[in-house]
Image (spheres, rainbow, N blue to C red):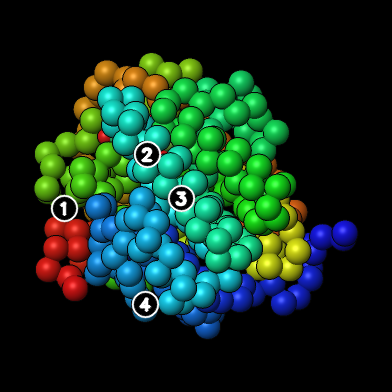
Amino acid sequence: MSVPRKNDTNLTPRGPVLVTGGAGYIGSHTNRLLRERGVETVVLDNLSTGHKAAVEGAFEQVDLGDRAALDRVLQKYKPTAVVHFAAKTYVGESVENPAIYYRENVFHTWNLLEAMRAHQVGAIVFSSTCATYGNPIEVPMTEAHPQAPISPYGRTKLHMEHMLADYAAAYGIAFAALRYFNAAGAHPKGDIGEVHVPETHLIPLVLQVALEQRREIAIFGDDYPTPDGTCIRDYVHVVDLADAHLRALGLLQAGERDLRVNLGTGTGYSVKEVIDCARRVTGHAIPARVAPRRPGDPPCLVSGGTHARDLLGWVPARAELETIVRDAWAFQRRHPQGYAGHT
Ligand code: UFG
C-alpha cells in the first residue's frame, strides 16, 4: 500500500480524539491545538501530576488502571484515535521506585490498548523519548540509533514502543512513537506552560531564579567533553511538539501504520548557554554555581533524525532558544506559583 507523505493534503486529524494526560504539560498544548483545528477531544487524566486549569473542553478524571471507567469513557465519547501522554516521567524516581513506572507506564498502556481493541479505536500517537536510546554512541542521534535505555523510565517507554508495534502487527492498531528530546517553552499566549512538582528541569528552574524564588541555579558538572564543559541538550518548543502530534495522527488516519520519529530541532545548547539566554531574556543576573554531575546525564543529546521532516513535513517553527525561553518566561511570570489560584 502506498503511504501518504507530507505533500498529501487532508492530513488534518479526525476526531473525536481521546487525549490521555491532557492536563499535563505537552498534553494540554496538544489538546488546545487539536481544538483550535476544530477536532473534538476528550481529556482523560487522573490529575496525579496534571492540572485541571490546563484542560480545555471535555474532561474525565479517570485513572488508566481503571478499566471499567475507561470503557465508560470510550463508550460515551466514541473516539476514533488516542493521543497518549499519561505517564510517569522522572528518571531519578524511576530508579528509586521502578514498580510505579512499570505499573503506570507499561501496565496502564496495556490496559489502554486492550480497551482500544474492545472499542475498535484504530490509532494511537504515543509520547516516547530520546531516553529510549540510552547513552549516545553517536551524536546527532537518528531514529536508527540503537535503543539501549539506561533507566527504568527509559526502559518502560521502550517496552511501550514494543507493545505498540506488536499490537499494530497483530491487531492493526496504527501507532506513532514520537521520541521527544527536551520539551521546553510555553504557549505564546502565556496561559499554559510547564509546571512540575517538584520541578527538576533546567529552564523553569533557571527562570525561578530570575523570579527570585531560588537564590541560584546549580550547574550539574562543568567538566564534560563539550566546548564549555556543560551538558548539551536539544530543546524543542512544546507548541512545535503539539504540531507534530497532529501531523502524526493525520498520517495514521490516512493509512500509515507504524511511525517512529525523533522530535528535536537538531541544534544543541549547553547548560551555560541556556543560563546566558535566560539572563538576556529576563534582564536578571541569575547567579549560577557549579555543582557535582547529576548521575546518568549524558554529555550531549541532539536529534539527527530526518523522519519528522520527511514523513510528517514537520519543521519546528519556534526553534530558536531565545523564543523558547521568552515564552517560558512569559508563562512563569504570570504563574509564579504554577496553576495555584488559576481555575
Ligand atoms: N541541569 C542543571 N541544573 C539543574 C537542572 C538541570 O545543570 O538544576 C542540567 C542537567 O544536568 C542536564 C540539562 O540541564 O544536563 C537538562 O536537564 P533537564 O533535567 O532539564 O532535562 P534532561 O535532559 O535531564 O531530561 C530530558 C527529559 C527527560 C528524559 C531525559 C533523557 O526531560 O524526560 O531528557 O535523558 F528522560
Which of the marked residues, 1 or 4, is nearer the chain's N terminus? 4
> Could you tell me if the residues under marks 1 and 4 are in contact, i.e. CB atoms within 8 Å?
no
Which of the marked residues, 3 or 4, is nearer the chain's N terminus? 4
Mark 2 Cβ inside 8 Å of ligand 1: no
Foreground tag (1 vs 4): 4
Q: Is residue 133 above or below residue 116?
A: above
Residue 253, given in percent of the width and then of the height, sits at: 68, 67
- The numbered mark at residue 111 is 3
Is residue 32 shown to the viewer in this render?
A: no
How many numbered circles are shown? 4
Foreground tag (3 vs 4): 3
Q: Which residue is mark 2?
A: 103
- Which quadrant of the rendered structure holds the C terminus? bottom left
Residue 34, given in percent of the width and then of the height, sits at: 50, 73
- Which quadrant of the rendered structure holds the N terminus? bottom right
User: Callout 3, which amino acid?
Assistant: Asn
Residue 112, given in percent of the width and then of the height, sits at: 48, 54
**Few, some or many C-alpha atoms within 10 Å of disc 1 (few <14, some 14-19, many ≥20)?**
some
Q: Is residue 332 above or below residue 280?
A: below
Foreground tag (2 vs 1): 2
Which of the marked residues, 3 or 1, is nearer the chain's N terminus? 3
Which of the marked residues, 2 or 3, is nearer the chain's N terminus? 2
User: Callout 4, which amino acid?
Assistant: Ala
Residue 55 figure quarter? bottom left
Which of the marked residues, 2 or 1, is nearer the chain's N terminus? 2
Mark 2–mark 4 distance (CA, rounded to whole Å): 26 Å
Q: Which residue is mark 1?
A: 211
> Could you tell me if the residues under marks 3 and 1 are in contact, i.e. CB atoms within 8 Å?
no
